[in-house]
Image: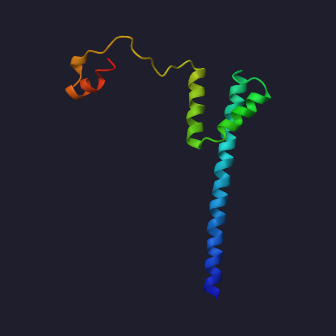
């Protein structure tokens, strides 16, 4: 009898622990999303409450990792950093091995 009660209590505690972890993760997502929306509003990328709420609901569905990437992209955009551009020139096909050349022949 006592073992059954302990097993049930342990199962309930595990369940509650998972629930608390989920709430903490959701809280972190909401905080990051709010931070991003505030940054966008300060940079005049979001104008008006309706846009802010739309962006907030969109960002709230993302993971914490995705929001960190979005946040970093916003910071890089402020500094005028560019992640790169595509070359206008076609690459020299002699630089590639035969397999790579075959795979890229339709694109080059």
Q: Nearer the viewer, residue 92 or 24?
A: 92
Q: Nearer the viewer, residue 61 or 80?
A: 61
Q: In x, y percent, where is residue 46?
A: 72, 24
Tell me if residue 29 comes above or below residue 21 in the rendering: above
Please tell me in which quadrant of the rendered image residue 14 appears.
Answer: bottom right
Q: Residue furthest top?
A: 89
Q: Residue furthest front?
A: 106
Q: In x, y percent, where is residue 2?
A: 64, 87
Q: Residue at x 64, y 50 (%)?
A: 25
Q: In x, y percent, where is residue 74?
A: 60, 27
Q: Residue furthest right?
A: 49
In the shown orientation, is residue 104 left or right of residue 13? Answer: left
Q: Residue at x 66, y 48 (%)?
A: 26
Tell me if residue 90 comes above or below residue 22 in the rendering: above
Specify the color scheme. rainbow
In the shown orientation, is residue 86 left or right of residue 61? Answer: left
Tell me if residue 24 comes above or below residue 105 in the rendering: below
Q: Residue at x 56, y 28 (%)?
A: 73
In the shown orientation, is residue 13 left or right of residue 97? Answer: right
Q: In x, y percent, where is residue 39?
A: 69, 28
Q: How many marks?
A: 0
* Rendered-image quadrant of the C terminus: top left
Please tell me in which quadrant of the rendered image residue 15 appears.
Answer: bottom right
Q: Residue at x 34, y 20 (%)?
A: 107
* Rendered-image quadrant of the N terminus: bottom right
């Amino acid at each position: 009898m006592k073992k059954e009660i302990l097993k049930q209590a342990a199962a309930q505690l595990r369940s509650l622990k998972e629930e608390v972890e989920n709430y903490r993760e959701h809280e972190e997502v909401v905080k990051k999303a709010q931070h991003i929306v505030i940054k966008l509003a300060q940079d005049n990328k979001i104008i008006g409450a309706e846009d802010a709420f739309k962006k907030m609901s969109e960002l709230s569905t993302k993971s914490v990792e995705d929001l960190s990437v979005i946040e970093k992209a916003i910071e890089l955009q402020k500094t005028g950093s560019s992640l790169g551009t595509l070359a206008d020139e076609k690459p020299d096909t002699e630089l590639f091995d035969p397999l790579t050349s075959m795979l890229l022949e339709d694109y080059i």
